[in-house]
Image (tube, rainbow, N blue to C red):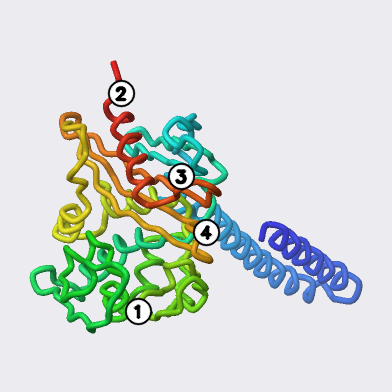
């Protein structure tokens, strides 16, 4: 814009001096006086234009067209450390991220894998529950859905089931129905608001899932179009449960209740999370445990994610991811003295 301004200014002065020289060559003294008067007025007009242009330039500099968002500014302030947590994983191909929001610090193990987007699988039940609760599609006290009578591989799913049990048993058909109730428009809007991974729900029914063609057990979050990295998982957890959360306390408390890990061994620490697992060709290619942990004595909260990828000749499960996460986060918050 500055280049355009100086070009316009030069053209204005050239035109004005052209008028002066032309007038001197062919006008009488009276005509010259008139032309000078006109010239003075035109010069005043040019000066006013210059003033307006300069004001516009100053405004543009003070208010850039695409200011950095608060989240973007926050990201530039966060530090990233790498840690050797291989002892927790053994021979399993995996990654871990712990985000300490109070210290504005990420600690990553296996950075490449920790920043690689993968299908969230059943960890997405945290988000689908959040969206359904916030938008009035789910009321925990009246949440029972009727079983179709079809026999599923998980015996816990073969019954009428309510929200709490459906979450804890990771009942896919229950959340498939719940997500359909929420609908594509609301789901897309809320994922955009949450900045959830690639926010891609284009494969709504989950037809890209080649491991399963049963539409009660497929969806965009199960080996399909929706992708998120382990590091992004911790960012989402912080947006939901952190101090700057835009979600209601009632919704977050409901999620805390169903996400609490009851069997943890370290009393000073409370860990909350959700597992997830996905297969391709009958082989586990994604196993997750993500959530947050609190150390009440210090009023300290961290957000975490443990991810396991395909590992030949190893038993890759979401239970293994959960076990690693509980030990890792507990050691992080309560280090050995």
Q: Earlier in the sequence, mark 1 or mark 3?
A: 3
Cα distance between the residues tagged 2 and 4? 43 Å
In this rendering, which labeled residue sits more in front, label 4 or label 1? 1
As drawn, which residue projects farthest toward the top? 337
Above-or-below relation of 294 to 116:
above
The label shown at residue 75 is: 3
The Cα–Cα distance between marks 4 and 3, rounded to whole angstroms, is: 17 Å
- Say the numbered circle drawn on residue 66: 4
Q: Nearer the viewer, residue 316 or 322?
A: 316
For mark 4, give the secondary structure. Answer: loop
Measuring from the top left, give residue 264's x and y in whole percent: 21, 39
* Residue 290 in the image: above or below residue 169: above
Q: Helix or strand or loop: what does disc 2 sit on? A: loop
What is the spatial separation of the Cα atoms under label 1 and label 3, in whole angstroms? 38 Å
Q: Which label belongs to residue 216?
A: 1
> Disc 3 or disc 2, which is closer to the eye?
2
According to the picture, the residue beneath numbered tag 2 turns out to be 335
Q: Nearer the viewer, residue 305 or 76?
A: 305
Q: Earlier in the sequence, mark 2 or mark 4?
A: 4
Q: Is residue 150 above or below residue 228?
A: below
Of labels 4 and 1, earlier in sequence is 4
Tell me what residue is drawn at x 35 percent, y 37 percent: 100
Task: Indicate left or right for 154 with 108 as reference.
Answer: left
Q: Is residue 295 left or right of residue 73?
A: left
């Amino acid at each position: 814009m500055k280049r355009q301004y100086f070009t316009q200014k030069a053209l204005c002065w050239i035109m004005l001096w052209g008028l002066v020289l032309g007038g001197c060559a062919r006008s009488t003294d009276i005509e010259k006086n008139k032309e000078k008067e006109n010239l003075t007025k035109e010069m005043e007009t040019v000066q006013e234009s210059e003033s307006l242009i300069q004001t516009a330039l100053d405004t543009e500099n003070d208010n850039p067209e695409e200011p950095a968002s608060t989240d973007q500014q926050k990201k530039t302030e966060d530090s990233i450390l790498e840690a050797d947590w291989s002892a927790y994983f053994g021979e399993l191909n995996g990654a871990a991220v712990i985000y300490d929001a109070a210290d504005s610090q990420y600690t990553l193990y296996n950075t490449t894998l920790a920043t690689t987007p993968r299908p969230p699988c059943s960890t997405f039940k945290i988000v689908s529950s959040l969206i359904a609760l916030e938008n009035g599609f789910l009321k925990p006290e009246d949440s029972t859905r009727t079983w179709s009578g079809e026999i599923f591989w998980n015996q816990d799913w073969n019954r009428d089931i309510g929200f709490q049990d459906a979450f804890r048993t990771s009942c896919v058909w229950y959340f498939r129905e719940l997500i359909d109730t929420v609908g594509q428009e609301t789901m897309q809007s809320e994922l955009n608001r949450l900045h959830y991974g690639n926010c891609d729900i284009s494969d709504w029914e989950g037809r890209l899932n080649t491991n399963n063609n049963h539409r009660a057990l497929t969806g965009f979050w199960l080996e399909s179009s929706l992708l998120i990295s382990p590091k992004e998982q911790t960012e989402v957890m912080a947006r939901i449960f952190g101090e700057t959360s835009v979600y209601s306390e009632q919704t977050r408390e409901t999620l805390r209740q169903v996400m609490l890990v009851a069997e943890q061994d370290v009393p000073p620490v409370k860990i909350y999370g959700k597992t997830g697992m996905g297969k391709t060709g009958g082989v586990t290619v994604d196993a997750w445990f993500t959530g947050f942990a609190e150390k009440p004595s210090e009023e300290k909260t961290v957000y975490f994610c443990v991810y396991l990828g395909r590992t030949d000749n190893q038993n890759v499960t979401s239970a293994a991811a959960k076990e690693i996460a509980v030990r890792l986060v507990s050691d992080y918050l309560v280090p050995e003295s």
